[in-house]
Image: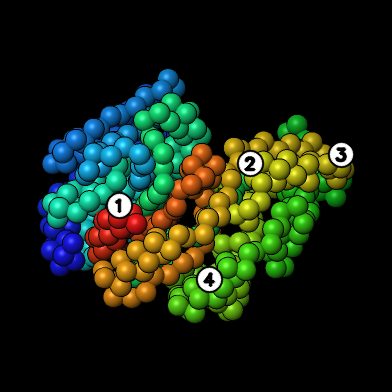
Amino acid sequence: MDPTRLTSMIDAAWEGSILPKLEDYIRIPCKSPGFERNWAETGHLDKAVQLIETWCRAQPIEGLKVEVVRLPGRSPLLFMEIPATDGSSGESVMLYGHYDKQPEMVGWREDLGPWKPVREDDKLYGRGGADDGYSAFASLLAISALRKEGVKHKRCVVLIEGCEESGSFDLPAYLEHLTPRIGDVTLVVCLDSGCGNYDQLWVTTSLRGLVGGTLTVSVLDQGVHSGDASGIVPSSFRIARHLLSRLEDAETGRVLPEAFQAPTPEDRMVQAKTSGRVLAESLFARFPYAGGTTAMSTDYTELVLNRTWRPYLAVTGAAGLPPLESAGNVLRPSTSLKLSLRLPPTLDAQTALDELSKLLTKDPPYGATVTFKPEEPGQGWNAPPLAPWLEKAIEQASQTYFQREACYMGEGGSIPFMGMLGRKFPRAQFMITGVLGPQSNAHGPNEFLHIPMAKRLTACVAKVLADHAVR
């Protein structure tokens, strides 16, 4: 496989074919089912999957089969099969991504917007381009490039789901439905993860789990004059704050109960030190701090571990609080907070969710009505040790297409699919990677796809697929 020729081929396909389609995809507000309950009526998910399906069907890959699979009441899933170059069917590579998107979010630059594709230098702005609309295109292009180079690969299946941003609650049914067609998976390539920089190949070694839900504290049936009631009726906000203090230290942010802790394996500690050294100040300098805000630490290793192996809480939404312009002197009847608790990768998410519910609702102060409505838990994941062939292939790919060594680090977010696959295919090796690097801001405003990174990553995937075939 000639790296120069492969790079040229991939660059031409990205510029001439993929980027125009990604711009069309960005225009579609195909929010994940968890954020758009009436997704079937709006048709946005259908429109997005059809756009990707049409492009995939047009690719000149002999034997390619493309199908949009639809189970009743579930978001559609794009499933593709590509036969092995030698016709064998004993094992399969699975390439994974998703096409559903996060909601709009506020704070976009004035000339940008979530459904407005804008190319600026090496970046393509818009919701979903990097998370994770590019994945289907890059997966097929890597396979197509191998075919054009006359390089062998094993049988491949490509699975692009429409529910990942909602926790992949539709995916188990599809995995069960498609199991006979998926085959014996010995390698999983996931393109939905992050990268510490755009200068080398990054491989994700672990993913934190996620539990959460809505905490509601009610103290009155209706609001009353604060001058009359404060000091007599307890504040629902203060009670909520007290309940959260059972979970986290308000000064340090440390999650307190041992039920939410797990030991960090030694190999992940070593990788955290390496990643911290490579990334250094960019670990914290890449965020858009307000005013004089600083990071929680300047110890690089500690920051990596905080982000990848330790539990931390975020309050991601609130209800019961009127807008500032209409907030009168009223003691409000209730406060609701939406909680998101990241978990160590090896902690059982369902057990943690049960513990969280009990912690927040037991013995409520002043006998207040306290409820916790949980959301579906997301199980974390810790990758199995890399086989020597895969470790060598990843390093060679990074050196060839980035001219730098590969780097390994856990991710703070969740990809529920990885845990499902790890249980279903215990023999599989995993190459979890992606293009979500500094300032790419998935889930937030001004999300962008770093185009050179996506091109190089496509070449790296092709290299790993080729090495998998001759290992």
Q: Secondary structure at mark 3?
A: helix
Q: Earlier in the sequence, mark 1 or mark 3?
A: 3
Q: Mark 3 to mark 2: distance in Å? A: 21 Å
Q: Mark 4 to mark 2: distance in Å? A: 32 Å
CB atoms of marks 3 and 2 within 8 Å: no
Amino acid tagged 4: Gln
Which residue corresponds to the image point at 61% horizontal and 61% vertical from the top-left?
A: 309
Say the numbered circle drawn on residue 95.
Answer: none
> Mark 4: few, some, or many residues within 10 Å (few <14, many ≥20)?
some
Q: Which residue is mark 4?
A: 271
Task: Give the image location of residue 126, x and y in percent.
Answer: 31, 52
Task: Give the image location of residue 49, x and y in percent.
Answer: 29, 34
Say the numbered circle drawn on residue 469.
Answer: 1
Q: Which residue is more in the foreground, 328 or 38?
A: 38
Which residue corresponds to the image point at 33% horizontal and 54% vertical from the top-left?
A: 468
Q: Earlier in the sequence, mark 4 or mark 1?
A: 4
Mark 1 or mark 3, which is nearer to you? 1
Q: Secondary structure at mark 2?
A: strand
CB atoms of marks 1 and 2 within 8 Å: no
> Mark 2: few, some, or many residues within 10 Å (few <14, many ≥20)?
many
Q: Mark 4 to mark 1: distance in Å? A: 28 Å
Say the numbered circle drawn on residue 213.
Answer: 2
